[in-house]
Image: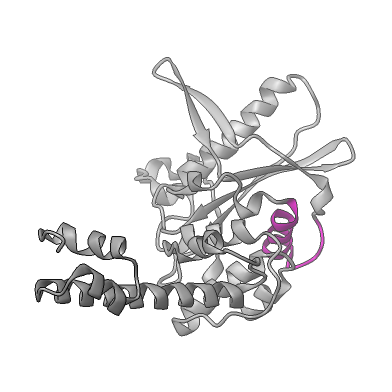
């Protein structure tokens, strides 16, 4: 996800959302992983290349623990486009975690698995790139049986069934519902479901759709918070209307100014201040009258 640094805390980093995604996508909605059994895992892994220490960064990673026993490391990667190198990337992330276990617990008997989920948010077409290591490689036939394969766990969010979407209990249900609707109908009709992590939900939608009106709606609020996607869409539509009206007022002001109408009369007609009118007409190369 190229824009993953745009947010300080992305939606999936909340334990309630993370566990919800894992339980629905891996366990068909069964409550296997509890939010209070998760703890943050540093998303960075390091490796040595050309004599230099280099860094790899996951989108989100969590440790799943039962008491003091670590059961697994679970990571998530968000994708807006199909990446032909995804199996290589995931193998690198997972391998770095296994190596960390080896270095930290040298000689220990307990080893835990690493699982990575790739969440693909494209809704115009299915993922059409390799899903396994072997698909990424040009392997001579003589070597094929000796090459270990490595498959990724890909989940196409926009292609989930309606039953799967309804299994989500966290804010991720809103995200999944949005992309499923966009795929099915090309449009989105919001519902009144309350959003718990408002800013993070809207940020994720903005980054995954490249439509930053969602995030802008959060920051544009003057009074009262956003409770659900109905509120969000209302605010987006209101801003759109206001911007449209302002554009028409500016076009009218420039036209009147070119006709020789005074700035004061233009301001009265457009119902804006004289300073605003000057900002509109001066950049056009005219001098304020």
> In the picture provided, is 113 more to the left or to the right than 7?
right
Residue at 22%, 73% (x, y): give it.
253
- Find out whether residue 28 is within the magenta segment: yes
Q: How is the image coloured?
A: one colour
> In the picture provided, is 113 more to the left or to the right than 76?
right
For the residue pair 266 and 182, the one nearer the viewer reads as 266
Dominant SS type (magenta): helix
Confirm whether residue 145 shows in the render: no
Mark count: 0
Q: Which percent across, then down, holds residue 171?
A: 67, 65
Residue 110 to residue 87: above or below:
above
- Find out whether residue 142 is within the magenta segment: no
> In the picture provided, is 244 more to the left or to the right than 200?
left
Q: Which percent across, then down, holds residue 88?
A: 46, 42
Residue at 62%, 66% (x, y): give it.
223
Confirm whether residue 220 shows in the render: yes
Q: Residue furthest top?
A: 51
Residue at 12%, 59% (x, y): give it.
287
> Quadrant of the rendered structure where residue 40 is?
top right
Instruction: Quarter of the image for the C terminus: give it.
Output: bottom left
For the residue pair 98 and 206, the one nearer the viewer reads as 206
Q: Residue furthest right?
A: 67
In magenta, the rendered stretch is 15-32
Q: Which percent across, then down, holds residue 153?
A: 58, 55
Q: Which percent across, then down, holds residue 181?
A: 53, 79
> In the picture provided, is 198 more to the left or to the right than 237?
right
């Amino acid at each position: 996800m190229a824009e993953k640094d745009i947010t300080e805390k992305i939606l999936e980093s909340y334990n309630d959302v993370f566990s919800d995604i894992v339980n629905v996508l891996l366990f068909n909605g069964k409550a296997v992983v509890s939010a209070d059994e998760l703890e943050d895992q540093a998303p960075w892994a390091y490796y040595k290349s050309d004599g230099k220490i280099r860094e790899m960064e996951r989108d989100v990673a969590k440790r799943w623990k039962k008491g003091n026993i670590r059961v697994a490391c679970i990571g998530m990667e968000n994708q807006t486009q199909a990446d032909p190198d995804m199996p290589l990337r995931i193998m690198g992330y997972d391998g770095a975690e296994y190596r960390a276990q080896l270095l930290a617990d040298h000689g220990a008997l307990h080893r835990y698995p690493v699982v990575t989920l790739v969440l693909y948010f494209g809704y115009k077409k299915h993922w059409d790139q390799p899903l396994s290591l072997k698909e990424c490689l040009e392997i001579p036939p003589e070597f094929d049986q000796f090459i270990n394969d490595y498959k990724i766990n890909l989940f196409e969010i926009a292609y989930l069934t309606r039953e799967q979407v309804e299994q989500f209990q966290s804010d991720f249900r809103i995200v999944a519902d949005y992309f499923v609707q966009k795929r099915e109908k090309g449009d989105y009709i919001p519902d009144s479901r309350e959003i718990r992590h408002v800013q993070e939900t809207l940020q994720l939608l903005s980054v995954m759709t490249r439509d930053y009106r969602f995030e802008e709606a959060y920051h544009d609020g003057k009074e009262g918070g956003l409770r659900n996607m109905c509120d969000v869409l209302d605010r987006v539509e209101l801003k759109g209307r206001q911007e449209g009206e302002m554009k028409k007022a500016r076009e009218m002001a420039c036209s009147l100014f070119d006709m020789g109408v005074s700035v004061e009369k233009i301001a009265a007609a457009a119902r804006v201040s004289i300073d605003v009118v000057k900002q509109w007409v001066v950049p056009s190369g005219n001098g304020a009258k």
